[in-house]
Image (tube, helix red, strand yellow):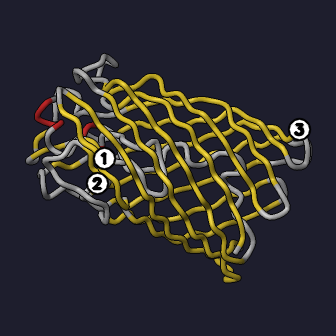
Amino acid sequence: MRNILWKGLFCSGVVLASPAVLAVEGGGGNTPNGADGFMAGALPPPGTYGLAFLNHYSGDRFNDGNGNSSVPGFSVKANVAALKIVHMTNTDVYGGLLGFYSALPLVDQTVQAVGRTDSRTGLGDLEVGSLVAWHQGDWHWYGLMALVAPTGLYNKDRLANIGSNYTTLRPQFGWTYAPANGIDISSRFTYSFNTRNNATNYKSGQYFEADYNLGYAFTPSFKAGLQGYYFQQITNDEQNGVKVGSDGNKGRVLAIGPGLFYQSSFASFELKYLTETMVENRVQGKSLWFKSVFKF
């Protein structure tokens, strides 16, 4: 574990915003776990939109493959502010609307482990993508392809890194079922393919991640629900072409917690608090999310 730790183990795990320090080279990833919730699959009509994210993440243990704490004196705290710009066009693609987006986070984090402390603040990795969104009655869904570029600060000798130092290609699918009775059932699924970190010759395995929401609209403007995410690494981590550890250092986590949503005349606002459990080969912690969507 110590060998992995010194090879840039900790990074923001953020693309647009996420539970910020998820040991990328220790079974985690750079997908924004928990970012989507209410109406996750319902993209807006043609126009340009801004999505603002604030996230606070804290964890006091790093678990091994058996779910046991494995790094002495470990703790992490991170704050993320991110802006995502989405532009939906009028272009028809197989009955859906074509769109494009970009997202960039600003990350501040502090990591403590095995007697060392490190802090860092700066811009994280840039994410760009194109998508197609469909709407049919009570159902809404989209498909997209994202590219995460290694633009964030990275140093293999630092504990705190806010960039991953590798490129990720990520297909994504989201859907929402929102009938007139007020139910909101939504989810977002991603699958990530990672290139090698050339600074450490470490390649993080492929992983699946899903955000979910089970909500209900008590009024036309107010919703409450149960939200969270599930992360499961599928293929092994490798270093110098060799599998890392007996289990490939595969990460896993389930998060769950309450969420609130409010729609005003000019923007929507979402607040959630998520607690992680069933954690293997990564940080275990809690996160507080705030999200707002508005039209330019």
Quadrant (top left/top right/bottom left/bottom right) for the C terminus: bottom right
Asked whether disc 3 touches disc 1, contact meaning CB atoms under 8 Å apart, the reply is no
Q: Quadrant of residue 218?
A: top right
| Structural distance between the alpha carbons of marks 3 and 1 | 39 Å
Residue ranking furthest to the bottom? 91
Nearer the N terminus, badge 2 or badge 1? 1
Which residue shows up at 66% across the image and 76% down it?
48
The amino acid at mark 2 is Ser
Nearer the N terminus, badge 3 or badge 1? 1
- Residue on which the image places disc 2: 164
The amino acid at mark 3 is Phe
Figure disc tally: 3
Up the image or down, 87 lies above or below 58; here it is below
Asked whether disc 2 touches disc 1, contact meaning CB atoms under 8 Å apart, the reply is yes
The amino acid at mark 1 is Cys
Q: Residues within 10 Å of mark 2 (few under 14, many from 20)?
A: many
- Judge from the rendering whether residue 55 lies leftward or rightward of residue 147; answer left or right: right
| Structural distance between the alpha carbons of marks 2 and 3 | 41 Å
- Residue on which the image places disc 1: 11
Quadrant (top left/top right/bottom left/bottom right) for the N terminus: top left
- Residue on which the image places disc 3: 218
Which residue shows up at 40% across the image and 29% down it?
59
Where residue 143 appears, as percent x and y from the top left, is 58, 62
Q: Quadrant of residue 155?
A: bottom left
Q: Secondary structure at mark 2?
A: loop
- Judge from the rendering whether residue 58 lies leftward or rightward of residue 291; answer left or right: left
| Structural distance between the alpha carbons of marks 2 and 1 | 6 Å
Q: Secondary structure at mark 3?
A: loop
Mark linked to residue 281: none
Q: Secondary structure at mark 1?
A: strand
